[in-house]
Amino acid sequence: MERRIAFLAVIIPALLLTLSGCGSNMYEGLDDKDTKEARQLEVVKHLDSGDYQWLLDRPSEVSATDYSAAAMGLAGLKPTELIKSLNNMSTGIKNDLSPVAALSINPDALGYLVEAKKKLIAERASKPDDPELNFQLTMTSLVSSLTALAQVGIANVAGFNPRDGISQSEAATLGNFVAANPNAGVNADVDGDGSITGADTLVVLVANDVTAINAALPKSQLGSGSDMSQVLTSVTGSLDAPNGVSDGPGVTAGDISSYLKNIFGK
Ligand SMILES: [Ca+2]
Ligand SMILES: [Ca+2]
């Protein structure tokens, strides 16, 4: 009898603990779901109202996709407008980014775009074929390159103002600058070593973006025949080999300069 009581004395508290554990977990589960939904509504509200900084100040609380949408919004290139401009390009010269660059570009967003790409690539590591992540990485990489060009232009070229878009003549002048300054730096940690140094260059950034677009675009489920897919393939191809002339695989300062002077700036 004593042994039985001792047994129950052990087992009943254990059972109660288990039950109360289940109970509280169950309620916590509900709370979590409600909190998550409320949080997502809040995220959407801030995105819709253009309060991008709210999301960008909470990098560990928002998804990579939402964070990158905010970074693109801050850059001035909202995904919806970007898609519209890219589709418009399909009826003209497909590799000429000037219609997209005519949108207002905020060069200060570059650091957030670089962070957004890191977040997307990290999340994509476990979901390599996720179409939404791949599409967002494609868009964010394109915006990152345009914003970097805007930043290098405004910092180095007299009269260059990307806030009303990058004009063809600004692109051509920037092309000359890049030719003379192949190691032009950007104000963002491009190589991901935790600090901004002379190694964080425009060329490394654009080369990374082109590589990312080439990898992510086919997995974005746009369809290879879609206007956007054709335009983006044409743009990245021309950034690597402007006017069909290749200096070897990979984007170099010479490629960027030639693209800016002969395609974008013409
Ligand atoms: Ca760095
Ligand atoms: Ca090349």
Image: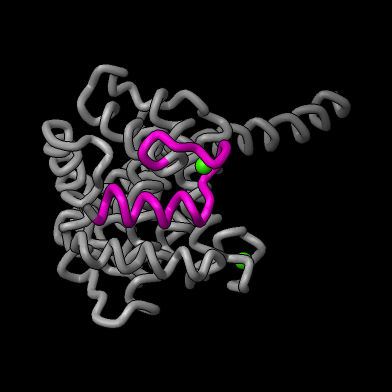
Q: Residue at x 40, y 34 (%)?
A: 244
Direction from residue 173 to residue 214 in the image, left or right? right
The picture places residue 174, in percent across and down from the top left corner, at 35, 67
The image quarter in which residue 112 lies: bottom left
Q: Which residues are magenta?
A: 242-265
Task: Residue 98: say if magenta.
Answer: no
* Residue 16 point in image, percent of width and height: 61, 35
Q: Nearer the viewer, residue 28 or 226?
A: 226
- Where in the figure is residue 108, as x and y percent of width and height? 35, 72
Q: Is residue 24 left or right of residue 258?
A: right
Prevailing SS of the magenta stretch? helix
What residue lies at 42% left-to-right and 47% top-to-bottom? 64
User: Is residue 24 something that shows in the picture?
Assistant: no
Query: Percent from the top left, x then y, of residue 243?
Result: 36, 39
| Residue found at x 13% / y 40% | 84
**From the viewer's perspective, is residue 244 above or below residue 102?**
above
Between residue 90 and residue 229, name the one nearer to us: 90
Per the image, is 254 magenta?
Answer: yes
Taking depth in this image into account, of 175 and 61 the one nearest to the observer is: 175
Q: Quarter of the image containing the N terminus? A: top right
